[in-house]
Image: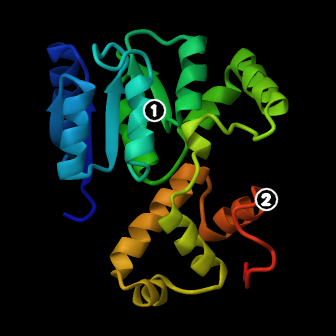
Amino acid sequence: MSDTIRVLIVGREALFRKGLKSILDTDSSIEVVGMAASADEGYLIADDEMPDVVLVGTTLTDAPNVSAASQFRTRFPAIATIVVSPQESEDELFAAIRAGASAYCAQDVAEERIISLIRRTKNGEWVINEQLLEKPYVASRVLEQFRSSSDSLGPTQAYAPLTDRELQILKLVSEGKTNAAIGYELGISAQTVKNHVTSILRKLAVNDRTQAVVMALKRGWLSIDDDVKV
């Protein structure tokens, strides 16, 4: 059952939650581990269950629009976040990109599409990048923000700062050490190191450890004087 994709559904409307669950229940590779009617309830379930993917609505009373998605990315960077809106809009797509969402779709999305989004984002894909390319206006806004910011997309959660522990682990990764070696040096398990690395990759929106080290060097989080082996 290790290949099972664990999904959390967070949305204000009961029909939204139950409708998505009924769709996902038709796929034996997906398990809905929880449903929440509020963002706060969703955070608690995520703490307990640590799902692979969270589907977040945009009409939550305690976290409207993409606020909940942004918080999920900050609190649980290893969890892929899919924003599900009553109706797609370019402004909301732009906001979802800024929030660091892995994908964005409307509530009337086709069943096979939402299942595909869940599978792809669980595997670390940033499907929202494809959606961005399909919307020239949104792409131009993202590029304009990139040009006008001295820290690229610094305010967004997709480029959120790493924690001290993540920086420590990334430095050891840059030295060419394995997860097991890093875990031994830090006194933690190799699985815990792997979880941290997954969090680092999602935060930096990169696909592998080498890209993460290069990104950290460019942003000044690692010094070229460190024993970097990429």
Q: Position of residue 129 (x, y in %)?
A: 63, 36
Q: Which mark is residue 218?
A: 2
Q: Where is mark 1, residue-wise? A: 70
- Crowdedness of circle 1 by 10 Å Cα count: few (<14), some, many (20+)? many
Q: Residue 80 at x, y = what percent?
A: 41, 44
Residue shown at the point (38%, 38%) measured from the top left: 72
x 45%, y 45%: residue:
121
Q: Quadrant of residue 42?
A: top left
> Mark 1: which amino acid?
Ser
Q: Toward the viewer: 129 or 34?
A: 34
Can residue 182 be seen?
yes
**Does residue 4 appear to the left or right of 162 in the view shown?**
left
Quarter containing the C terminus: bottom right
Label 2 Cα crowd, 10 Å radius (few <14 / some 14-19 / many 20+): few
Residue 85 image position (x, y, % from top left): 40, 16
Compared with 102, 216 (above or below) is: below
Quarter of the image that includes the N terminus: bottom left
Badge 1 marks a residue whose secondary structure is helix
Q: Amino acid at mark 2?
A: Lys
